[in-house]
Image: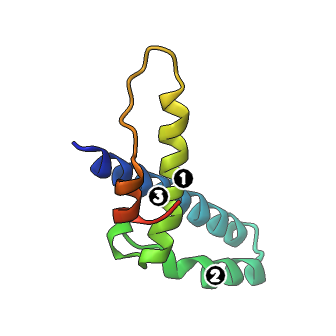
Amino acid sequence: MDKTELREKLAELDHKHWEYFTKSATNAALVQRMLPLHDFLEAEWGMYWKPYADLPEGLKNLYRKWADQFLELLSKWPGLEVLDVSSEDKAKGGQS
């Protein structure tokens, strides 16, 4: 896996985490019989409850920024070799 692929996998993982959290929060509102909140959250977030590959490019770029921050943090870990996401790779997948 090259560094661009790693970056995309991390961005996809971040989206999956967000999707899990937002669905859980929305379901919790339903369980608590907070229907106006449930309906609001579902309307705001539901349109993005889809696979990462199907998201608009602008939203993918936001996830890529989080992936870049994660890679930067790992690169500072002593003794851990992490692929550096160069500015050339960032230009291919979105600006950070």
Rounded to the nearest angstrom, the CA distance separating label 2 from label 3 is 21 Å
Mark 1 or mark 2, earlier in chain: 2
* Label pair 1/2, CB-CB below 8 angstroms: no
Give the answer, above or below, for where 70 lies relative to 22.
above
Identify the residue position indicated by label 2 in the image: 44
Residue type at tag 3: Arg
Q: Work out whether residue 34 or residue 41 is closer to the camera in this orientation and state it.
A: 41
Q: Nearer the viewer, mark 1 or mark 2?
A: 1
Residue type at tag 1: Trp
> Residue at 48% of width from left, 30% of height from top?
75
Residue type at tag 2: Glu
Rounded to the nearest angstrom, the CA distance separating label 3 from label 1 is 5 Å
Q: Work out whether residue 84 or residue 21 is closer to the camera in this orientation and state it.
A: 84
> Residue at 63% of width from left, 81% of height from top?
44
Q: Work out whether residue 32 or residue 13 is closer to the camera in this orientation and state it.
A: 13
The x, y position of residue 25, in whole percent, is: 66, 63
* Label pair 3/1, CB-CB below 8 angstroms: yes
The x, y position of residue 63, in whole percent, is: 50, 60
Q: Say what secondary structure mark 2 lies in.
A: helix
Furthest residue toward front:
88
The quadrant holding residue 43 is bottom right
Identify the residue position indicated by label 1 in the image: 66
Left or right relative to 42: residue 63? left
Identify the residue position indicated by label 3 in the image: 64
> Residue at 57% of width from left, 66% of height from top?
23
Give the answer, above or below, for where 33 lies relative to 71.
below
The x, y position of residue 10, in whole percent, is: 41, 49
Furthest residue toward top:
79
